[in-house]
Amino acid sequence: MDQSLFISKAFSNSLRPTKIIPYYYRASGVIEQDDITITTLITRNRFPVFFRLVERYQGPISVTIHVKNDPQNIRNLLTALDGLYASSKFMSMYVDVHLVVDPFDRQFNLWRNVARFFARTDFVMMLDIDFAVCTDFRSVIRADTSIMGKLREGNTAYVVPAFEYADHREGVDEEIFPKEKQVLLSLVHTNRVGMFHSSWAFGHGSTDYEKYYNASPGTIYKVVNYQSAYEPYVVFKKDGPPWCDERFIGYGGNKAACLFEMYLSGISYYVLADHFIIHQSHLYEEVARKNERKSNRRVYADFKEETCLR
């Protein structure tokens, strides 16, 4: 079958015209099947942040890069991408790059699906690019036969709790971020660090941060107060769980929709209480966020009703 026809069908809910180019760069290192691929999505302005993720994680990454469909922009972006990919030995060793070329902004769930679809390991972590991986959850998961067994069964997703600095100026340089939970807790207790987007408690509140703070080393606990706006960052089995609904365009509800449909499919969420990620502060496109969130609230209401009736 012609590859472009197959890809067109696989991502048939995306806006048109959209051209998907898988493996524009393909990692040359050995990829172990039971490893955990970080799946993420970036635009050109996030290249420096992506470089830091690659250097820190040093494991398989499947990234979707959005390319605005303008000849000059394409040339400039591909030149910058060539430089990025050559800038670290870990790029060519671990990173698969997939391009989405179209005239649209922020088809986030399409981009997520592309990164996951072309990941080459059995397990993935769906991560937004602006989070720094602070602890080695990957090695801990792979070394624990119980955790790996539940992942293979396909009905468990493991939450890595997300944090941010109260003073966003402190959240710019990931080099100063804590790497151990005890150091994180000291920052929490002095109110310098807290739950990510604490002003929108529905987004991450189901993780139960108080329980996380008081958990003894090695604890893994079940999320018991799930609600439909919950959108944690999770490790799960690549094949089997539902894919992200591609009707969501722009900010608001897109990742929550992914997690909601996974939950309805029978997946339970468990929190890795020794581990954490921290948001790297940056400016948001506030006007776009406000308008797109308003639109996506209506889309999400319809989506929830349809999904529950399936």
Image (cartoon, grey):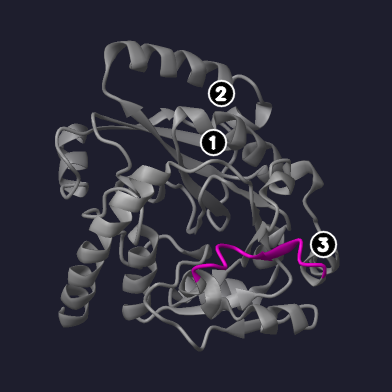
Is 231 displayed left or right of 190 in the figure?
A: left
Residue type at mark 1 is Val
Image coordinates for residue 235, horizontal then vertical, percent: 53, 64
Asked if labels 3 and 1 touch by Cβ distance under 8 angstroms, the answer is no
Q: Are marks 2 and 1 in contact (CB under 8 Å)?
A: yes
Residue wearing tag 2: 85
In the image, residue 53 above or below residue 245: above
Is label 1 in a helix, a strand or a loop?
A: strand
Mark 1 highlights which residue?
Answer: 95
Q: Name the side, left or right, on which 194 lies relative to 1.
A: right
Q: Disc 2 or 3, which lies upstream in sequence?
A: 2
Regarding residue 224, the answer to whether it shows in the image is yes
Q: CA distance from mark 2 to mark 1?
A: 9 Å
Q: Residue 156: give x, y in percent of width and height.
A: 48, 76
Q: Main secondary structure of the magenta part?
A: loop
Q: Is residue 195 magenta?
A: yes
Give the percent coordinates (x, y) of residue 1.
15, 37
Judge the density around disc 3: few (<14), some (14-19), many (≥20) Cα neighbours within 10 Å: some
Does residue 240 appear in the picture of this structure?
no
Q: Earlier in the sequence, mark 2 or mark 1?
A: 2
Between 77 and 119, the residue placed more toward the observer is 77
User: In the depicted view, which residue is nearer to us: 255 or 11?
Assistant: 255
| Quarter of the figure that contains the C terminus | bottom left
Span of residues in magenta: 190-200
Residue under the point 57% across and 50% down:
32
Question: What residue is pinned by disc 3?
Answer: 180
Image: 161 above or below 133: below
Nearer mark to the viewer, of 1 and 3: 3
Residue 64 — which label?
Answer: none
Position of residue 150 measured from the top left corner of the image (x, y, whole percent):
53, 77
